[in-house]
Each structure stands twice: as C-alpha cells, then as structure tokens.
Image (tube, helix red, strand yellow):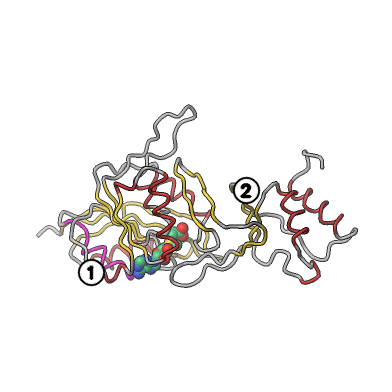
Amino acid sequence: MAPSMTPHTRLEKALTERQGGSLPGKIPTKWEKFADVVILPRNSFSEPEWKPDEPMWQIIAKALDVKRIARMGEVQGEHRNSGVELLLGEDDWVIRREHGIDFGYNFTQCMWSAGNVTERGRIANGNFEGENILDLYAGIGYYTLPFLSEGTRGPNGERGTGRGAAHVVACEWNPAAIQALKWSLSANGLEECCTILEGDNRNQIFKSEFDRINLGLLPTSEDGYSIALQSLKPEGGKLHVHGLAMGGKEHEWAENLAELLEEMGPFSCSVDHVERVKWYAPHQRHIVVDIHASPVSC
Ligand SMILES: C[S@@+](CC[C@H](N)C(=O)[O-])C[C@H]1O[C@@H](n2cnc3c(N)ncnc32)[C@H](O)[C@@H]1O
C-alpha cells in the first residue's frame, strides 16, 4: 500500500477490499495510538454487519501500523477501571513514555486520560525540591511520578526544568493501579522517594506534615478536602484540587472552593492559579485549582 496515504485512507481501502467493495458501516476517523497499540473510539465496528474476526482485526492493525487493537469503553466504578476492551493481541500491558517518565500499566484495567497530558507536564516540569507531598488519588502514578521527576529532557539529553520532590506519599485502593505504580517507580528509579499507602485514603491517619497535597479525582475530590486540610503542615502549603466547572465559570468555581476550604479551617485559603485541563463534557471543563493555604493571622 502506498506509504503516502493517510492512515484513514489506508484503513478505508483495506476494509473496502475485505468487504468486497462496500462498507457495512462507518469506519472511525480518529483514534489514540501509542507504542504498538491503537485504541479505537467506543462503538467502532460494533454493527453486527461487520462480522469482525481475527483476520479483520489483522487488516486494521496492518493499515494502522500497530500490533494490538483495543476499543474505548466507559471509565467504570470507584476504582476508575478503564473499560477498554482488547480486540487483537495477547496482553494489555503497555509502557507510555511522556515528559521523560515511563508509565507502565494494563490498559484494560487502568484508565489513561490523554487529555490530561498538559497537567502531567505542568507537574513534571515544576519545582518541588525538598517538598513532602501527599497524592490522595494516585492511580498508576499520573501525578505521583511527575512530582518526583525532572521533567522533559532537552533534545541532547539536557536536564529538564523539573525538580522532583523529596518524598511523595501515594494513596490508592485499586490493586491493578498499585501494581502499575510499583513497576513505574522502579523503572524510573524513584522507589526510594515514594511510600504507597494501599486502601481507602479515608481510613488512613496522616500527620500534619505535608507541604503540598494533590487531589486528582473526577468528577469530584471533595471527600479528600478535610483529609487534605488536616494533613498540611501548620505553616500551610499548596493544594491542587481537580474538579468539574461549567465553561466560563471556572474562576467562580475556584473562588467558591477557596471559600469552602477556608470555612472548613484551619487555614486562610486563596486561589493561586486555575488550570484549564480539558473539556470533560459539553460545557463542562476539567480544571485544577491551585490553592494557597496559610495560617490565619490573628
Ligand atoms: C484515575 S485516578 C485519576 C487520575 C487523573 N485525574 C486522570 O484523570 O488521569 C484516581 C484514582 O483514585 C483512586 N481512588 C478513588 N477513591 C479513592 C480512595 N478513597 N482511596 C484511595 N484511592 C482512591 C482510584 O482507584 C483511581 O485510581
């Protein structure tokens, strides 16, 4: 097949040949491709007329230049399982390299939000030198690893601008995510700087010893607000609170959050920054609010 064709044209041509000239349904126009995997959008090739079988997936894999094919599902349950279905290939383990970090995980079990790339980059390239950080919803280490890393290296391997924290305490209750996090900590040489607390973070007892706390759970991380406030050092620190705000009302949402956190005590809370991460649903944005918490002056 001509290499100059777009992947979509290659796919269309290969499937049209297989189907004997006419396609029984739509073929996707976009997908997520990483390593040797393509993840097709939800419902792709689900019409029964496609009669999908191994040779058809092989044709698609060849056209898209991958070895494994999966289809997007709905992120499910409190463990945030990915809902991704493997259609071609023996196993679902993958290593994604991003911002100089290797993230390993089983993609049918753990979610990966491609749209959060900018937030992972913001953290990976930030300066957290000397800090003791609590990540309340660590997952496979989406933010735990960036908090500890030195970020993206230059074209000739120059050191990135990121400065890793002294230590991160990572809370997670999904065994598949914990296994992935352990693998990635070891692969990136960071296991000495991280303590994993397995189980429900609401059942953990934290000392007031953290400089910074990450609350990266959607649709809301509000169950973690009081834990976060109790875990900050008495001299205060920073919170990164993920949430969903109506488009255009992000700052209002952030100010309301600061007010709520201040009412919950014992800190004076203000908004440092509002990061617009991605559209989560029509009109609804995933945002991260950076909160500065400082002791209340008498
Ligand atoms: C999926 S991550 C969110 C990552 C990031 N916001 C993203 O979208 O890429 C959230 C993680 O928090 C974990 N989690 C949720 N509630 C928890 C709790 N109470 N205690 C410990 N872990 C929890 C879930 O298992 C999940 O792995």
Name the quadrant containing residue 170: bottom left
Label 1 element class: helix
Q: In the rendered structure, find residue 36 and report the number of the disc placed on it.
A: 2
Mark 1, residue position = 263
Judge whether 184 appears above or below 74 on screen: above
Q: In the rendered structure, find residue 89 and report the number of the disc placed on it.
A: none
- Percent coordinates x, y for residue 231 in the rendering: 22, 61
Task: Give the quadrant of ligand 1.
Answer: bottom left
- Percent coordinates x, y for residue 255 in the rendering: 33, 62
Residues 206 and 295: in front is 206
Judge whether 130 appears above or below 51 on screen: above
In this view, the mark in front (1 or 2): 2
Residues 90 and 163: in front is 90
Residue at position x 67%, y 58% from top? 88
If you read the primary sequence from the N terminus, does the residue marked by circle 1 or circle 2 appear first? 2
Give the CA distance from mark 1 to mark 2.
50 Å
Q: Can see residue 195? A: yes
- Percent coordinates x, y for residue 147 in the rendering: 35, 48
- Ligand 1 closer than 8 Å to the CB at disc 2? no
Q: Tell me the magenta residue range.
A: 221-233
